[in-house]
Image (cartoon, coloured by chain):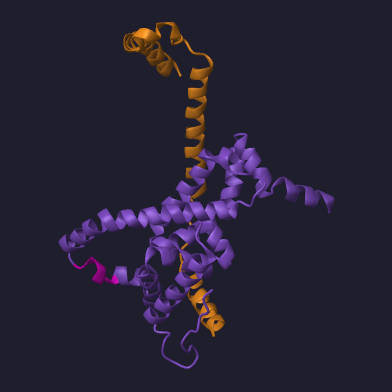
């Protein structure tokens, strides 16, 4: 029993960060195995793009390696990972909106009706696409809050600390995000989900 | 009422996100790049620990642009050799 506890202690995030600070790549691998799901989920939910999420996952852990000396081993690692992931995802979305989107539109126009092909349709089934479009249509600041709340099950307080915004702002963004999602996903009609009555502080 | 909506939205978003998974080769790629970064960091530190260049002399501070120019000229050759050797 004590051996098990010792082993658990040795592989705690705190100890792994200290090992990483000492230059251990094994520690980086273990931290990657442990937290890659969290980072990938957050990145894909904000960007809506699996390839981008894979690249962001890579970038986040490379930064963890590069800036390990700035990470406090006494504090939990998750908030650092969430903060880094949302910031990098925001940057990716902004860059894409500015540069890549118009280029992609031109490419689609040149290639023709790529998005009407059966292969593309099979890849993106209806329900998947609906949810992705609903989330992508949210303003970026609302999207971050919605993703951290619904996908990662974080509390309002935790989101406030990660995004460095007041709890009231988190609540209001969540409220508008929820309303927009309900509308986009067709959840407004029906008696199961009547209009929301959200209390503001 | 928020609870019902929240539970439904949470389930929908999680199902959507869980349809994709991280790439299988992600760990190997990460560790390879981190190892490369560590190696280049080590090389630079070696350069700093064993400098084969002359120290910048503060005694020439009155004519610092000329002194700096001379210092760069004298040491750039040494640094290039050091970089090639490492």
**As rendered, which of A170 and B15 lies closer to the eye?**
A170
Where is residue A18 shown, x and y percent of the image?
65, 40
Residue, far front:
B62
The rendered magenta stretch, by its main secondary structure, is classed as: helix
The image shows residue A109, relative to residue A128, as above or below, that is: above
Which chain identifier belongs to the orange chain? B
- Identity of the residue drawn at 44% across and 53% down: A87
Where is residue A154 shown, x and y percent of the image?
57, 65
Where is residue A109 shown, x and y percent of the image?
17, 63
Q: Is residue A100 left or right of residue A85?
A: left
Q: Quadrant of residue A157?
A: bottom right
Quadrant assignment for the N terminus of chain B: bottom right
Magenta residues (range): A113-118
Where is residue A201 shown, x and y percent of the image?
54, 73
Q: Quadrant of residue A45?
A: bottom left
Q: State yes or no: residue A179 in magenta.
A: no
Which chain identifier belongs to the purple chain? A
């Amino acid at each position: 029993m004590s051996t098990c506890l010792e082993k658990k202690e040795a592989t705690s995030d705190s100890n792994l960060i200290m090992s990483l600070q000492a230059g251990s790549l094994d520690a980086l691998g273990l931290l990657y195995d442990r937290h890659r799901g969290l980072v990938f989920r957050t990145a894909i939910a904000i960007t809506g793009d699996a390839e981008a999420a894979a690249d962001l996952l890579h970038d986040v852990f490379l930064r963890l390696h590069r800036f390990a000396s700035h990470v406090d081993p006494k504090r939990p690692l998750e908030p650092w990972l969430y903060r880094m992931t949302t910031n990098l995802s925001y940057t990716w979305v902004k860059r894409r909106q500015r540069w890549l989107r118009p280029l992609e539109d031109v490419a689609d126009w040149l290639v023709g009706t790529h998005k009407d092909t059966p292969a593309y349709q099979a890849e993106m089934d209806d329900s998947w696409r609906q949810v992705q479009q609903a989330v992508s249509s949210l303003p970026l600041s609302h999207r971050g809050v919605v993703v951290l709340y619904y996908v990662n099950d974080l509390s309002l307080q935790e989101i406030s600390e990660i995004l460095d915004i007041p709890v009231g702002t988190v609540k209001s963004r969540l409220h508008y995000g929820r309303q927009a999602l309900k509308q986009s996903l067709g959840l407004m009609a029906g008696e199961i989900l009547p209009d929301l009555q959200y209390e503001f502080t | 009422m928020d609870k019902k909506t929240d539970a439904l939205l949470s389930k929908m978003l999680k199902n959507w996100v869980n349809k994709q998974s991280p790439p299988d080769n992600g760990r190997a790629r990460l560790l390879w790049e981190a190892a490369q970064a560590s190696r280049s960091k080590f090389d630079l530190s070696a350069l700093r620990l064993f400098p084969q260049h002359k120290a910048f002399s503060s005694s020439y501070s009155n004519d610092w642009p000329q002194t700096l120019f001379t210092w760069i000229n004298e040491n750039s050759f040494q640094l290039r050799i050091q970089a090639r050797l490492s």
